Image (spheres, rainbow, N blue to C red):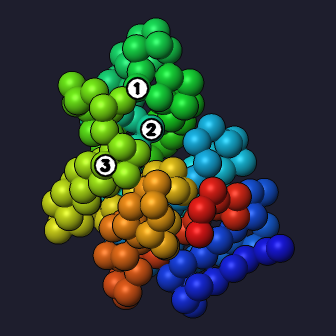
């Protein structure tokens, strides 16, 4: 396998072990959107390398729930909470460990839609639409003044409409043709 480029320097699929991913593509981007497999340590390693290379002003992360972390003190405070109290449990803990150990001064912001809505009463298609529309609102606001890195599950970068998930991802369709954007997807993605 190897790198699969749908549009040169725009959409890149990488092998989970980082082979064939040229991180120089993120250096001048104003927005980079990365699709990863939740909890895959190789994917997380790639994401952390992208953060170090891009040096974004803000990192928007699905797996951080609705946390806003603007200091190591805040990250340590959240880390001390029980794993079960975190929206994404162990994955959130992994992110907090990285934030605590990272030397960069970057704001990390969870973008997950936290609501009292009973998701069991709505379709998966409706869940994805609500969540992704919420994320787009946050992204649209942040890219006005900041270099932004967005980290979501790879399925949220789907290029096609499906019966179960609905429309093609707005994160993909909106940023695909922007000259200042790069979309990076894991080779191990669940859907096209």
Quote the CA–CA distance across marks 3 and 2.
Answer: 20 Å
The residue positioned farthest toward the right in the image shown: 1
Q: Tell me what residue is drawn at x 62 percent, y 38 percent.
A: 39
Crowding at mark 2 (Cα within 10 Å: few <14, some 14-19, many 20+): many
Crowding at mark 1 (Cα within 10 Å: few <14, some 14-19, many 20+): some
Whether residue 8 appears in this view of the structure is yes
Tag on residue 136? none
Quote the CA–CA distance across marks 1 and 2.
Answer: 7 Å
Residue where numbered disc 2 is placed: 63
| CB within 8 Å, label 1 to label 2 | yes
Residue 9 image-quadrant placement: bottom right
First in sequence: mark 1 or mark 2? Answer: 2
Q: Tell me what residue is drawn at x 44 percent, y 56 percent.
A: 165
Residue where numbered disc 3 is placed: 126
First in sequence: mark 1 or mark 3? Answer: 1
Mark 3 or mark 2, which is nearer to you? Answer: 3
Relative to 126, does residue 115 appear above or below in the rendering? above
Say what secondary structure mark 1 lies in.
Answer: loop
Q: Using the image as rendered, state which of residue 42 and residue 74 is in the foreground.
A: 42
First in sequence: mark 3 or mark 2? Answer: 2
Quote the CA–CA distance across marks 1 and 3.
Answer: 20 Å
Q: Tell me what residue is drawn at x 23 percent, y 30 percent.
A: 117
In the rendering, at what x and y percent does residue 31 appear? Answer: 37, 69
Say what secondary structure mark 3 lies in.
Answer: helix
Q: Tell me what residue is drawn at x 17 percent, y 68 percent.
A: 144
Quarter of the figure that contains the C terminus: bottom right
Q: Using the image as rendered, state which of residue 30 and residue 187 is in the foreground.
A: 187
Residue where numbered disc 1 is placed: 87
| CB within 8 Å, label 1 to label 3 | no
Mark 1 or mark 3, which is nearer to you? Answer: 3
In the rendering, at what x and y percent does residue 160 appear? Answer: 48, 72
């Amino acid at each position: 396998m190897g790198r699969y480029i749908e549009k040169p320097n725009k959409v890149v699929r990488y092998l989970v072990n980082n082979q064939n991913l040229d991180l120089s593509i993120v250096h001048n981007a104003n927005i980079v959107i990365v699709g990863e497999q939740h909890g895959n340590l190789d994917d997380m390693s790639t994401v952390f390398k992208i953060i170090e290379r891009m040096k974004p002003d803000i990192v928007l992360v699905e797996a951080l729930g609705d946390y806003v972390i603007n200091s190591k003190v805040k990250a340590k405070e959240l880390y001390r909470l029980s794993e079960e109290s975190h929206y994404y449990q162990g994955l959130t803990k992994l992110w907090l460990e990285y934030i605590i150990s990272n030397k960069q001064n970057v704001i990390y912001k969870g973008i997950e839609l936290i609501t009292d809505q009973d998701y069991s009463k709505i379709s998966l298609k409706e869940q994805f639409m609500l969540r992704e529309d919420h994320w787009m609102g946050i992204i649209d606001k942040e890219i006005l003044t900041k270099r932004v890195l967005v980290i979501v599950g790879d399925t949220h970068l789907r290029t096609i409409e499906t019966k179960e998930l609905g429309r093609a991802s707005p994160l993909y369709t909106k940023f695909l043709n922007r000259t200042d954007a790069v979309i990076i997807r894991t080779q191990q993605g669940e859907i096209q």
